[in-house]
Amino acid sequence: AYTVGYVAPVMLAGIFTASIKRILELRRWSGWITPASGLLLVGFGLFSLVTRLMPIA
C-alpha cells in the first residue's frame, strides 16, 4: 500500500503529460477565452434577470 501511494503521483503525471501539453498549446487562444466566457456569463445573467422580471407565461 505504501508503494502505491508513493508511485501513484508519478504515474499520473506521466500518463497526463500529453494532455498537459495540449492544454498549454491553448495559451494562444486565452486572450479570447476570458472575454468570451465573461460575455456568456453576463448574457446568461441578463437572460435570467429578464425572465424573472417578465415571465412569459
Image (tube, helix red, strand yellow):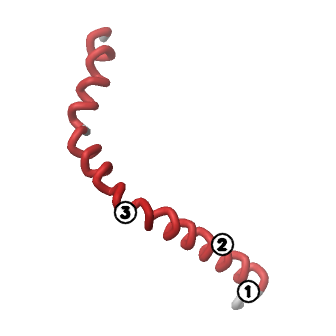
Find numbered disc 2 in the image and state the secondary structure of the residue it sits on: helix
- The one of 55 and 20 positioned closer to us in this rendering: 20
Residue shown at 29%/44% (left/top)?
20
Q: Position of residue 55 (x, y in %)?
A: 73, 86
How far is the residue under mark 3 from the one under mark 2?
Answer: 24 Å
**Could you tell me which secondary element the residue under label 3 belongs to?**
helix
Q: Position of residue 29 (x, y in %)?
A: 37, 63
Location of residue 4 by image quarter: top left
The Cα–Cα distance between marks 2 and 1, rounded to whole angstroms, is 15 Å
Q: How many marks?
A: 3
Image quarter (top left, top right, bottom left or bottom right) of the N terminus: top left
The residue under the point 21% across, 35% down is 15
Kindly identify which residue carries mark 1.
55
Amino acid at circle 2: Gly
Query: Where is mark 3, residue-wise?
Result: 29
Is 48 on the left or on the right of 18, as rendered? right
- Residue depicted at 56% across the width and 72% down the height: 39
Which disc number belongs to residue 45? 2
Other-residue count near label 2 (Cα within 10 Å), few / some / many at <14 / 14–19 / ≥20: few
Q: Is residue 4 above or below residue 30?
A: above
Q: Nearer the viewer, mark 2 or mark 1?
A: 2
Q: Secondary structure at mark 1?
A: loop
Check disc 3: other Cα within 10 Å, few if <14, some if 14-19, many if 20+.
Answer: few
